[in-house]
Image (cartoon, rainbow, N blue to C red):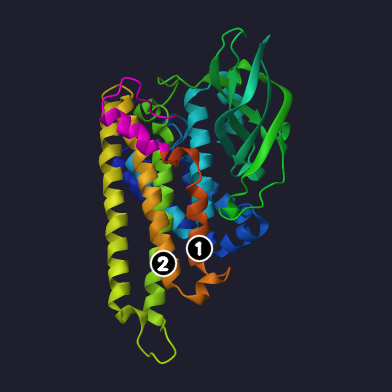
Amino acid sequence: MATLTSFPTDTVGKRRALMDAVESVRATLEASAAESEETATLSRASVDALYDSGLLRVKLPHVLGGAEADPVTQLDVLEAVSRIDPAAGWCLMIGAASLGGSAAFLPDDAIDELFEGGKPPRTAGAFAPYGTAIPVDGGYRVNGRWPFGSGVRHSQWVSAGARIPAGEPGGPLQLRMVMPTASVTIHDNWQVMGLRGTGSCDFSVDDLFVPARFAWDVSLTEPRRGGPLYRLGRPGFVTNEHSAFALGVGRRALDAFGEVSASKTRGYNSANLLAHRPVLQRALGESDMRLRAARALNVEILSDAWDAVCAGHTPEPALQAQMRAVATHTTDVAADVATQAFRYGGGSALFTTNILQQCLRDINAAAQHQMVSDTAYENHGQFLLGLPDARVME
């Protein structure tokens, strides 16, 4: 497996290095996928592979040894990993975003502690502001419980959203807090239908002191380190990840669909392969076009956002709404594709060893995420109508 210590700064070289890293972990991810499903957390071998290959640094500032990749390059990388193993792709997107955001916005003294020995830490996070932060001398007293802590069992640090309530000094204000994983309680509650291998357990803290240097105001759009990537704002910094995951899972389902079609017959008296049935040919062709169209729309919108941040400003709310809506659209398309592939997979698709049933479960689990809620369409429509109270997220 290739180990990256630094990344090229040019876009083409950076993308090539990252995609080479994806290929270097392919065999490990494939071999460990079943273990992740069985143990309900990403396998240690997969975690180590993603870390050692440098893939978890895809969103990390270059000055700290990261790739600081543009959103379209990120789309390529996360899609490719999700196509190999959906659980690994999901944990990669959460871990990379948590690490990248913390590294861009925390002050230097926190970074020195976080990057012990100059090495990036293994991180996890839950972005919803389910915590309460009460200002005290030198920091905050934090209480809260956060669901969906993907990869938390293999992390050294976790980041989480918290609010300073109205009436408290500086409140109301939404913060991101970074805490040692050893200081949080991990709840063994990840008994779920889909995304089993992500180990997305709840975690909680009870009156934990978090120093002020380990928190930042989420409304900030000018990073302490790093460049245009960290001006994407909310939700722009993470929307492409959901699209990438959906594209990867949808394409994996379509891969399996094609393999089944070329080897399977249907009916008691039929010797004809499924591949020879016009209805299946149509389904496969249409599904391919829908995934490719969704991908092209992502590239268009993400390129517009990248142009905005490279020009020195955070994308306007209307563009932020498009970024979220295209992630929802892509997830919807991928869910349709995986459902149709499963349906044509026949009885063999029911077995837990069949990737078609896993793709069906995983994409539907991913579709439950707030970021890809159908409210994204409503918010995009509000901007199209020019409504004065249009919002990016409800």
Q: Amino acid at mark 1?
A: Ala
Sequence-first disc among 1 and 2: 1
Q: Nearer the viewer, residue 203 or 78?
A: 203
Q: Residue at x 31, y 79 (%)?
A: 277
The region drawn magenta spans 375-393
Q: Residue at x 48, y 60 (%)?
A: 359
Q: Residues within 10 Å of mark 2 (few under 14, many from 20)?
A: many
Q: Which mark is residue 341?
A: 2
How far apart are the two marked residues, 1 and 2, measured between alpha carbons?
24 Å
Give the side of residue 224 with respect to residue 47, left or right: left
Query: What residue did someone put label 1 on?
Result: 27
Q: Secondary structure at mark 2?
A: helix
Q: Nearer the viewer, residue 7 or 228?
A: 228
> Is residue 392 on the magenta stretch?
yes
Quarter occupied by residue 131: top right
Residue 278 x %, y %: 27, 76
Residue 209 x %, y %: 71, 20
Q: Is residue 77 visible?
A: no
Q: Nearer the viewer, residue 296 or 226?
A: 296
Q: Is residue 325 visible?
A: yes
Q: Secondary structure at mark 1?
A: helix
Give the side of residue 187 with respect to residue 254, left or right: right
Quarter occupied by residue 394: top left
Residue 312 x %, y %: 29, 21
Residue 390 x %, y %: 34, 25
Q: Residues within 10 Å of mark 1 (few under 14, many from 20)?
A: some
> Is residue 386 on the magenta stretch?
yes
203 lies above or below 359: above
Q: Amino acid at mark 2?
A: Ala
